[in-house]
Each structure stands twice: as structure tokens, then as C-alpha cells.
């Protein structure tokens, strides 16, 4: 049996909402903390949580500016790592395997540098060290013209998923990106992310790392994954025929990678 405890805690800049799940017997090994990327929510981890929670404690949460958490910034990689650390503190988790998707992978690395004693391993799915600032001004103008939901509806199907993915996944991702979020918050989140370079952060990580990227990822392509893996001192795992949001497209593959990696590095 699994226990599921929704939570709301007071984070550094506002409320942080999330879900704490675990086997009723506590499971084995260190907990897993899941960090979503920008313009997502913890819903992108829902299927992975379902698969992992019978084995060990799993915590997912909404970063500031996203989902059910508060919408105050700053929306920096340091700020997101602060949110993750606040969750660990509030839930009395001394050490966790920290797993991020997309920009959440950078937040996981930042947390490992900021509080190395709290992080057993880091993992990045569909991550990048930098994001090319391609036509950012025109994108912002388009966002202000059409609004949040239509903005994401215009590029999510191609930018975030492999061809032929179930429309239900696209709809879930669209809801996660747009629900309860205003134009200016989304602009601030995007500008902060595309301005970031976490190369030196990744190079400073001293714990074991797992890096995986979808073969068909249009947002953070395989070359980006290779750069992340090189900075973290590991090899890239390429998930065949998958796009950017592999946590939704291939939860079985992602959960298996996380559990195998965590088990191999649990303190015994």
C-alpha cells in the first residue's frame, strides 16, 4: 500500500505545493525528490511517481511561478534550488536523490553544489547547460498578443513531444504550462531560463550523476544532453524515439533508470 500526503509549505518567496508519497512500510533507500522544468508542473512526474512510490519515498512539488505554488520570483536556478531545499527541510529529509527534467536538471545540480550533504545523486532528463536565445523578442511579443494558453498551444506539440504522441499528454502539458499563470510571470520565467548558463554549476557537482535525453528532443537536443553529461562527468543515455518531456512520454523507462541508479548509490 502507498500513502499519499499532499502538502503546502512556506517557501523562500511563497507557498510551495507538492505531494509526498511512500510505501506504508517506508521502502528502502534514500527518498527521491523530483524537480520539474520551466513552464511545467509536478504533473509531468505523475506517472513516474506512481511507478516509484511502491519502492521508496518520492516527493514532487511545484516550483515558484508554476502549478499550485506561489507566483513570486526571482525565477533563477538558485531560486529553484532554494525551493527544493525548503521542501527537503520541511519534510525532514536529510538526503535525497534529486532528479530534474529540463531546467529542473540544472536546479538539481545547483542544489548539489549549494547543499552537497543533502544530495545523494543528481539526474537530468532532457536538460541543457544553456538555452539558445532564438527569437526571444518575437516570442514575447507573440505571448503578449495571444495569451498564455494559446502561446503554449502553438509550440508544445512539436517542441515538447515526439511525433505521434497521445493527444492526452499534450493536453496535460498544456494545462500544466498555462493554468493559473499570467503573461508577465511566464515572460519572467522564460527570460531567466534563457539567460542562465549552468556549465560551471554542473562541473562543480561532486555526487554521481545520471543524464538522459530523448532522441527526438527538439528543445534540448542530444547535443545538449551530451554537454550536460560531459560537465557532470558521466555518459549520456539516449531514449530512442522520445521527445523533450520524456517523463510523460516514457515513464516506465524513466522510472527504471531512476530506481536502478538510486539503488546503485544508496548508502548501505
Image: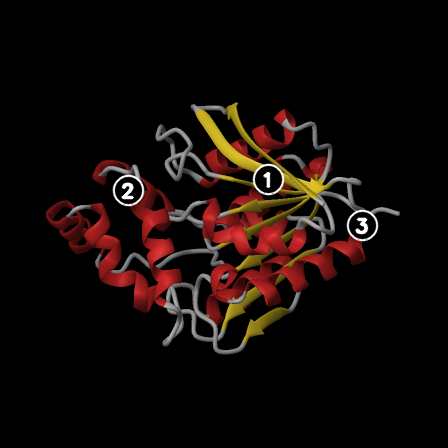
Q: Residue at x 23, y 49 (%)?
A: 149
- Measuring from the top left, give residue 243's x and y in whole percent: 44, 69
CA separation in Å, label 1 and label 3? 18 Å
- Measuring from the top left, give residue 238's x and y in whole percent: 56, 73
Question: Is 41 rendered above or below residue 115?
Answer: below
Q: Residue at x 67, y 56 (%)?
A: 209
153 left or right of 70? left
Give the foreground label among 1 and 3: 3
Give the label on residue 186, or none: 2
Disc 1 residue crowd, few under 14, some 14–19, many 20+, Cα 10 Å = many
Q: Are marks 2 and 1 in contact (CB under 8 Å)?
A: no
Question: Is 171 rendered above or below residue 196?
Answer: below
Q: Which residue is mark 1?
A: 111
To which quarter of the image does residue 169 belong? bottom left
Q: Residue at x 40, y 72 (%)?
A: 162
Query: Is residue 195 among the parts visible in the rendering?
Result: no
Give the farthest residue toward the left.
Answer: 145
Does label 2 or label 1 sit earlier along the sequence? 1
Q: Which residue is mark 3?
A: 266
CA separation in Å, label 2 and label 3? 37 Å
Q: Secondary structure at mark 1?
A: helix
Amino acid at each position: 500500500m502507498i500513502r499519499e500526503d499532499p502538502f503546502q509549505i512556506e517557501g523562500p518567496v511563497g507557498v510551495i505545493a507538492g505531494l509526498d508519497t511512500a510505501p506504508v512500510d517506508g521502502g528502502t533507500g534514500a527518498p527521491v525528490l523530483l524537480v520539474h522544468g520551466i513552464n511545467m508542473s509536478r504533473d509531468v512526474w505523475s506517472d513516474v511517481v506512481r511507478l516509484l512510490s511502491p519502492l521508496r519515498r518520492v516527493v514532487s512539488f511545484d516550483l515558484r511561478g508554476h502549478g499550485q505554488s506561489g507566483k513570486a520570483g526571482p525565477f533563477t536556478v538558485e531560486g529553484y534550488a532554494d525551493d527544493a531545499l525548503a521542501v527537503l527541510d520541511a519534510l525532514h529529509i536529510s538526503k535525497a536523490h534529486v532528479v530534474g527534467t529540463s531546467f529542473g536538471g540544472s536546479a538539481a545540480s545547483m542544489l548539489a553544489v549549494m547543499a552537497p550533504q543533502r544530495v545523494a545523486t543528481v539526474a537530468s532528463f532532457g536538460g541543457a547547460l544553456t538555452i539558445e536565445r532564438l527569437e526571444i523578442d518575437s516570442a514575447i511579443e507573440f505571448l503578449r498578443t495571444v495569451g498564455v494558453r494559446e502561446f503554449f498551444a502553438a509550440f508544445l506539440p512539436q517542441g515538447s513531444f515526439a511525433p505521434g504522441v497521445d493527444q492526452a499528454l499534450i493536453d496535460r502539458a498544456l494545462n500544466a504550462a498555462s493554468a493559473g499563470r499570467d503573461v508577465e510571470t511566464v515572460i519572467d520565467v522564460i527570460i531567466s531560463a534563457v539567460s542562465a548558463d549552468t556549465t560551471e554549476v554542473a562541473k562543480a557537482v561532486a555526487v554521481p550523476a545520471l543524464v538522459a535525453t530523448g532522441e527526438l528532443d527538439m528543445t534540448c537536443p542530444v547535443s545538449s544532453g551530451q554537454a550536460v553529461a560531459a560537465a557532470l562527468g558521466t555518459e549520456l543515455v539516449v531514449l530512442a524515439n522520445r521527445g523533450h518531456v520524456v517523463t510523460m512520454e516514457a515513464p516506465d523507462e524513466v522510472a527504471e533508470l531512476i530506481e536502478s541508479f538510486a539503488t546503485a548509490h544508496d548508502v548501505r
